[in-house]
Amino acid sequence: MPDVFTKRKRSEVMARIRGRGNKETELAFAAMLRQHSITGWRRHPDMLGRPDFVFRDHRLAIFVDGCFWHCCPRHSKVPTNNREFWQRKLKRNVDRDRLVTKALRAKGWHVLRVWEHDLGRCGQAKCLRRLSRLLQAPR
Ligand SMILES: [Zn+2]
């Protein structure tokens, strides 16, 4: 089936989805940190890979990844319309995520990737456990 959007229109639509999706997930993560009185973090520092959050003293970079955009193994679903376009695009995201994680680790950073679905009520406990382990790790 042909694409219903022109190329320009499609990137507008996708930019909207991407913006909203990421922002909400990031806000949920920030809310979780505040709720548990976890301090010492910053958002979007100007550094390699532009992590969503960093705990600089702990050299910990956190990425909050949307299930769709970063191809979560549980919820990832390539749209059937324009399948090839999406496969390529999503694969680029996954490849970039991997590269960034690797590059940061090579520079001695801890990297925590949190899925959007981990920020639901039941996922949060697990997410907090991982985070506190990393924050307690020797620096
Ligand atoms: Zn997911």
Image (spheres, rainbow, N blue to C red):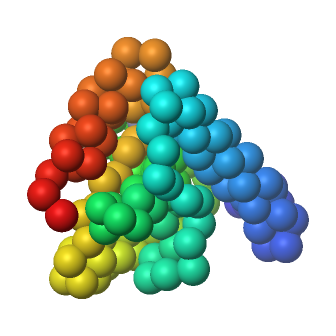
How far across and down, in percent of the image, does residue 48 sit? Answer: 44, 82
Relative to 116, say whether 121 is above or below: above
Relative to 100, say whether 23 is above or below: above
Can you say which quadrant of the picture contains the C terminus? bottom left
Residue 19 in the figure: left or right of residue 13: left
Whether residue 31 is visible: yes
- Residue sitting at 31 percent across and 67 percent down? 59
Whether residue 61 is visible: no
Q: Quadrant location of residue 91?
A: bottom left
- Residue sitting at 77 percent across and 67 percent down? 11
How far across and down, in percent of the image, does residue 72 sit? Answer: 37, 45
- Residue sitting at 38 percent across and 45 percent down? 114
- Residue sitting at 49 percent across and 81 percent down? 47
How far across and down, in percent of the image, does residue 34 sit? Answer: 56, 33
Residue 28 in the figure: left or right of residue 76: right
Considering depth in this image, is 23 or 90 the residue closer to the camera? 23
Can you say which quadrant of the picture contains the N terminus? bottom right
Residue 82 in the figure: left or right of residue 104: right
